[in-house]
Amino acid sequence: MTRHRSAALVGNPNAGKSALFNALTGARQKIANYPGVTVERKSGRLVLPDGQPIELTDLPGSYGLHATSPDEEVTAKVILGKHEGEASPDVLVIVLDASNLEQHLVFAQEVIALGKPTVVALNMIDLAERDGLVIDPRALEQALRVPVIPTVAVRRRGLAELSAAIEAAPERAPEPQHAHITQTERRVTAHAIADAAIVSETATHALHARLDRVLLNPWFGPAIFLALMFVVFQAVFAWADPFVGALEDTAAAMGNAVQAALPESLLRDFLVDGVINGVGSVVVFLPQIIILFFFILVMEASGYMARAAFIMDRLMAFVGLSGRSFIPLLSSFACAIPGIMATRSITDPKDRLTTILIAPLMTCSARLPVYAVIIAAFIPNRTVGPGIGLQGLVLFALFLAGIVGAMVVALILRRSVTKGKASGFIMEMPKYQLPRIKDLAIGLMQRAWIFLRRAGTIIFTITVVLWMLLSFPRAGEGQSQLEVSIAGRIASGLEVVVRPIGFNHEMALAIIPAMAAREVAVSALATTYAVGATDEDAQAMELGDRLKSRWTLPMALAFLAWFVFAPQCLSTIAVARRETNGWKWPVFMLAYLFAMAYVAAGVTYWTAVWAGL
């Protein structure tokens, strides 16, 4: 039986291959999996101008013939004719995104160098023109030595010309290149080819290119990223201060109103000490949460976040990871749960496991209330330079400590239990654009609602339970309620363990419910000191004033160091168990994080004491 001729669409992800495949084959398609793998195989029938059918296959997107994922492995084997029971395609159709020409030309050179009959489909040419980019297909054809056909798949433009080029391709195959060429050399060549093929570009497009030259620079890029992060943490304190003060005044007024309206009773203590002081002490940090997420959303919407991942690839490679790990770790600044789930995009299993294990070291937004209340109480609100506040500087240092800790742990893990080399990293750069005010508003409303819902459910429940454990059994004459209560007795047992690192009875009590949710440490302290207050003046004191009256600066710094490294909430541990298919690695995570937290708090406390702080 005569074998039908065959062709395959190849190219980077997001080049528009699927749209072009659908336009060329219509309903004449079938979908299955390649033998032995779960990679989807799409094939269909294309009728050429001479009336002869040809089998067209849409290969998975790939960045190179040296596979780093199952998708890329299938593509490489099919192109090279090494896939079991399947001959190499007679014609290769390279699909390029015209608006991202330089990036896509790197893989195109590698395919053309094989010397197989090849056609280039310069796809999405209309979007390139919309972005102010005019490309000369003939100049591109001359540089690549294969036919180049401009196409717009979704509008069926250029399909007839592409079919004719596929029909004629076997008669004009390019000469194979046997010389070894590195990826760096291909990138340099791709840049030169793209420059020669671009006839004109708008000022906006040229500006974006200049921005990339600065923001993606291996020296300027990381410095700019760290400077932006520094500004973010300065703003978290400077911008939020008046709003936090207003919420604190509101909470105090509510507490006073309840005390005035109700006679002295267990119900009044519950409402004031358990609900208003407990939950209210966390809610007042909503402005700081909103400011933090405002900056994160702006960086995502503007296209900068992907570039931050790209420039951090060098640092990640130093510790044995790749830039693919950066996005999940960056997501963990919001919450480690989506950060751990985002590791599914990491193809290397050891890379993925390492990223999961270090994700809790990223300072999630739940830690922000803990940091904010301690910093506001013990760090003076003064400047240490033009526009540089000491409180914001300390907050930045805490976030930086988590990042440095994560990198050190990754370095150790990649040379021991998850030993392996860093994998390559290529990603598409989104276009720069101004964030839409509506999108930012929706995003901030969603984040605020998540925080408030958490305060009204998890934090409220834990605070109420803690209040009950602190309130019963009732202390007798001359006894301390904090000592005789159920929670107090539990804390007394833990205090023996944490006293060497500078923790007192109340601090030992606060770290227990914080395992359920980080923010609860603040409400636990507020509730504990409210229940333990012996007079109305003490009850009326704000949490920061209570801390200053009971803690020393070395104790406060040790508490901050503990929360930089202490294990995440129980929900994070549960997600880690699900993503690693067992308890082995979550237990390992808990053990090393507790050890780091204990050592860091102890070193911080005794260093501060030695320094006379």
Image (spheres, helix red, strand yellow):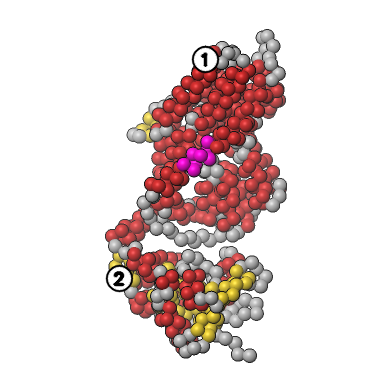
Q: Secondary structure at mark 1?
A: helix
What's the residue at 52%, 20% (across, down)? Answer: 255
What's the residue at 42%, 33% (across, down)? Answer: 240
Q: Nearer the viewer, residue 76 or 279?
A: 279
Q: Nearer the viewer, residue 405 or 381?
A: 381
Q: Is residue 14 above or below residue 216?
A: below
- Percent coordinates x, y for residue 161 in the rendering: 41, 81
Q: Is residue 609 above or below residue 308?
A: above
| Residue range highlighted in magenta | 445-452
- Is residue 449 covered in magenta? yes
Give the main secondary structure, helix, strand or loop, of the magenta stretch: helix
- Please state which amino acid type lies under the numbered disc 2: Val
Q: Between tags 1 and 2, which lies in front?
A: 1
Q: Quadrant of residue 566?
A: top right
Residue identifier under label 2: 199
Report how far apart the C-alphas of labels 1 and 2 lie in the structure.
Answer: 77 Å
- Is residue 317 covered in magenta? no
Q: Residue furthest front?
A: 261
Q: Mark 1 or mark 2: which comes first in sequence?
A: 2
- Please state which amino acid type lies under the numbered disc 1: Ala
Residue 154 visible in image: yes
- Percent coordinates x, y for residue 304 in the rendering: 42, 52
Q: Secondary structure at mark 2?
A: strand
- For the N terminus, which image quadrant? bottom right
Q: Residues within 10 Å of mark 1 (few under 14, many from 20)?
A: few
Residue identifier under label 1: 260
Is residue 64 toward the left or the right of residue 192 in the image? right
Which disc, if any, is residue 341? none
Q: Nearer the viewer, residue 287 or 256?
A: 256
What's the residue at 57%, 57% (across, down)? Answer: 346
Q: Residues within 10 Å of mark 2 (few under 14, many from 20)?
A: few
What's the residue at 42%, 44% (across, down)? Answer: 441
